[in-house]
């Protein structure tokens, strides 16, 4: 299953945006209002939970300076990735698009598609004010 957030344009350089997203503690400022828990577990790992949902641990898996950050599930029953693609437009302007990729059975995919789509859309939208 592949889901994409709307592309957001930020009045920040690709480097500044990449640096912000590289620091996992900054993800707290991107979370939706219905977050019930956020905890930094390590320099590259954090745990969060939304009301009514199980806790999820994300770990920074791979980075390509100033253009891509890949966070992946760390433990748990679901294997998925959250990918942040950063495209420089000008010196102080860039586009960011989040992609959620995971392999799920049809029933699970049907259940999580809506909430995950809304979640990554919220993360992307909140970047406009957080970064």
Image: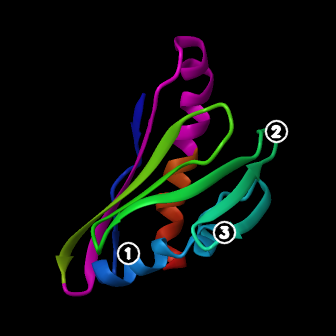
Whole-angstrom CA distance, mark 1 to mark 3, is 16 Å
Q: Residues within 10 Å of mark 2 (few under 14, many from 20)?
A: few
Q: Which residue is mark 2?
A: 52
Q: Residues within 10 Å of mark 3 (few under 14, many from 20)?
A: some
Rendered location of residue 68, percent (x, y): 32, 63
Compare residues 120 and 100 and report the one nearer the observer: 100
Distance of mark 3 from mark 2, alpha carbons? 18 Å
> Can you tell which quarter of the image residue 62 is in?
bottom left
Residue at image point 53% right, 76% down? 23
- Which residue appears farthest toward the top when viewing the image? 106
Q: Quadrant location of residue 37? A: bottom right
Pointer 1 or 3: first along the chain = 1
Judge whether 102 appears above or below 65 on screen: above
What residue did someone put label 1 on?
A: 18
Which label belongs to residue 104?
none
Q: Secondary structure at mark 2?
A: loop
Question: Mark 3 falls on what kind of element?
Answer: helix
Q: Which range of residues does the magenta coloring cover?
A: 91-118
Is 19 one of the magenta-colored residues? no
Taking depth in this image into account, of 113 and 67 the one nearest to the observer is 67
Q: For the point 21% across and 73% down, which residue is it?
A: 88
- In x, y percent, where is residue 4? 38, 43
Q: Position of residue 102 (x, y in %)?
A: 47, 33
75 sits left or right of 64 in the view: right
Q: Are marks 1 and 3 in contact (CB under 8 Å)?
A: no
Gap in angstroms between the C-alphas marked 2 and 1 = 31 Å
Q: Is residue 6 visible?
A: yes
Check residue 28 in the rendering and tell me which mark sits there, or answer none: 3
């Amino acid at each position: 299953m592949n889901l994409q957030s709307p592309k957001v344009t930020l009045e920040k350089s690709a480097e500044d945006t990449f640096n912000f997203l590289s620091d996992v503690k900054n993800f707290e400022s991107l979370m939706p209002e219905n977050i019930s828990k956020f905890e930094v577990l390590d320099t590259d790992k954090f745990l969060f939970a939304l009301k009514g949902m199980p806790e999820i641990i994300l770990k920074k898996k791979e980075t390509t300076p100033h253009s891509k950050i890949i966070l992946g599930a760390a433990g748990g029953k679901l294997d998925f990735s959250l990918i942040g693609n950063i495209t420089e437009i000008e010196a102080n302007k860039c586009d960011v698009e989040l992609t959620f990729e995971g392999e799920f059975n049809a029933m699970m995919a049907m259940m999580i598609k809506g909430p995950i789509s809304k979640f990554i859309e919220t993360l992307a939208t909140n970047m406009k004010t957080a970064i």
